[in-house]
Image (spheres, rainbow, N blue to C red):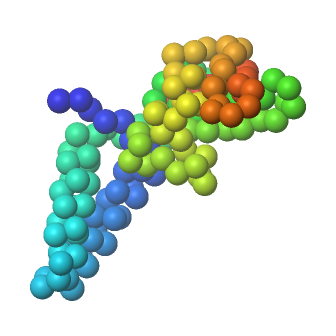
Amino acid sequence: MNMLKLTQEGTRKLEKELQYLSKRKKEFRNSPEKDFINSRMDEIENVLSRSITFPSVREAGDLVETGSVITIEETIYKERYTYTIVHPFEADPRDNTISVHSPIAKAALGKTINSLICIQVPAGENLTYNIIDIQNC
């Protein structure tokens, strides 16, 4: 069985959703939504039972991995972006958490500081970034 790696915030969000659904389940006892709630609760319980939670303390890292906080710099315009690479269950680009399956994460995983990564985009030129910082748990 593969262990899933979740951030502390991701674990908290899933636990909070599970509590919320547990309370809502009683309200929808005789509703078609009951099946959805039960299914989602089973899914969350499965994820939590197969997961480990990253510690919140971070240190400079050597390689990009799941759980890394990376800062990348676009090579032409020098714009910087910071992302946390997470399991797809907790990815939320609004919070700068990106899935390990995202193009940026796929290109960065296993790379070191000062590595160039190239992201292929469907239309237009490819995007190139330099990894300027890695923080790992």
From this view, report whether residue 10 is shown above or below residue 132: below
Determine the residue positioned at 32% across, 59% down: 15
Determine the residue positioned at 18% across, 78% down: 32
Count of numbered circles on the image: 0
From this view, report whether residue 20 is shown above or below residue 63: below
Front residue of 82 and 78: 78
Front residue of 62 and 46: 46
Q: Which residue occupies the extreme right position in the image?
A: 77
Asked if residue 113 can be seen in this view, the reply is no
Left or right for 119, reference 76? left
Q: Which residue occupies the extreme left position in the image?
A: 30
Residue 61, quarter of picture? top right
Front residue of 53 and 27: 27
Q: Position of residue 29 (x, y in %)?
A: 13, 82
Q: Position of residue 36 (x, y in %)?
A: 22, 68
Left or right for 18, reference 119? left
Q: Position of residue 86 (x, y in %)?
A: 46, 39
